[in-house]
Image (cartoon, grey):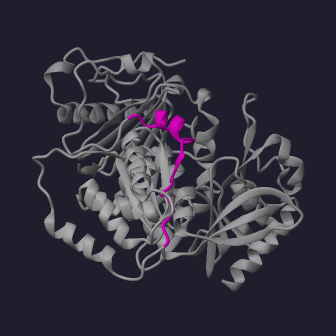
Amino acid sequence: MPLNLPERSDSKIQSDNVKSHLFFTEIIKSYKKAAASAGGEIHRFYKIGNSHLDISFAGPKGVPLLTPAFEHLMPEKKEKADLKIYIWDSASTGIALPPVPWNVNECIRQNQPWRFKNKRYDILFQPENNILNLMDRRLRKACFWINDFQNLPHYEVGSPLLAVLHWWFSRHHLQLIHAAAVGRTDGGVLIAGKGGSGKSSTALSCLQSDLLYTGDDYCLISNKAFPVVHSLYSTGKLNDKDISLFPYLKSSLCKSDCPKNQKKSIYFIHRCFPEKTLKKFPLKTIIIPKLTGNPSPRIEKIPPASGLLALGPSTVFQLPGFKEKTFRNLSEVVKKVPCYTLELSRDRNTNASVLSRFLTHL
Amino acid sequence: MKYRINKPDIVLEYFEDETVLINLKNGNYYSIDKVGTDILVLIEAELTTDQIMSAIKNRYNAYPGNMNSSVEKFITQLHNEKIISQKEKTSHTNNSHEKKTLDLLKKGPKLTFFPPKLSKYTDMQELLLLDPIHDVDETGWPKKKPDDTVNEK
């Protein structure tokens, strides 16, 4: 149920730049109060793509929810953070969100996301889940607030902090991309397509092959001389009805606590298969899976435009902002590597072994 | 009659034989075949509809059907999909770009003409709700009508 947010009464007399600055300052103050109230800050450090992140929680409540997806990216030694992300909720800390200096409640009543962007700040409020994402690019600080961690949407466990990370990496030479990724250290494949096209199941099938796992939903890609895929979340999602087809994922260690109304479960791949995790690889090809039910898989070359159709719109429309830049970045990627369709067979292991052999010969 | 591509709502990428377009405002996206891509290039080069017809006739072999009507129909389709809009008469015309494009189309052997094809995909519209506004300029808010709510829908 969307909350009505407290609004500042003097909101009409300030410019949007002043408002955003004051609001971000108040948010950080509230975070500090929340941390003091919840027993202190808890820090987790990660090396994601080219950036060192310090993710700080006000109290323990959010840690087991938002950190398992990044466990494979813990650095060997702590480095100075490029980006600090402050995370808190009001329910477990007793600290409310500071008054919002805009008239946002009209949008909230309509259950529509509300967004602000200027040269320095990005703000996104998602009323459906009472989540606020903020980024101050100049200070290299971001904030993620939710009213109550008890109501954290399941997708945030599998793909946490997506908005903030997209804003950050869009300005730091990496592009978030909606695709699964598997491969070897000398080269790998992006598996692109809409939800339900077989991305996750193809990537998870590769856990039983010699291919290593980089992600099943979102990855990062850099594209200087040649494209390099970087792991972001070591998670995988599966429909509960399909779990019997993946018996090696049945360990309870691997599965997140799933709300009863969710049809998909989230699996923390690094926890169960640390040796199968691949943090980055040079991109050799883009594969678009097609569910066919044929007895044997078939790979066929397609034009780069078809690769962009599979990769572009779903990435562009799932990420908040930088849409034209995202489209341009993905266009450049599909022009540098060949694209293929993989007609999936009913036998998942065969799909994985065919993909592995194909990659070897590319 | 001249048209212009509705940028920045429309983003597009030209490939050798195909173009991919996305309408950032409504979530529709499209692919356009080779002939359609040539027409789009000519629209972007600010040629009139008559000049586009003539350039396409120079580029492609005679077509048993009505080539002009196919091209016209395609341009109308682009217009109806809000990919292009009519260009105001007072707008500046880029003559150097125009000439370059005409020269380009005259070169090489003639190709086989097929009626241009615009394939439309609408399966991303629901995702627009996840991100209500498009990238804006450095002043912050997108321009909106006085009676709009804070979000651009």
Nearer-the-camera pick, A66 or A57: A66
Magenta segment includes B80: no
User: What is the quadrant of residue A16 in the picture?
Assistant: top left
Residue sitting at 74 percent across and 40 percent down?
A264
Farthest residue in the front direction? B64
Residue sitting at 33 percent across and 73 percent down?
B105
Farthest residue in the bottom direction? A361
Provide residue A134's location: percent of width, then percent of height.
Answer: 37, 39
Magenta segment includes B114: yes
Provide residue B99's location: percent of width, then percent of height.
Answer: 20, 71
Does residue A242 sit above or below A45 in this rendering?
above
Q: In the image, is B96 to the left or to the right of B126?
A: left
Residue sitting at 82 percent across and 53 percent down?
A249
Q: In the image, is A189 to the left or to the right of A30?
A: right
Instruction: Inspect this view and state whether residue A172 appears.
Output: no
Does residue A8 sit above or below B76 in this rendering?
above
Magenta stretch bounds: B112-132
- Quarter of the picture holding the C terminus of chain A: bottom right
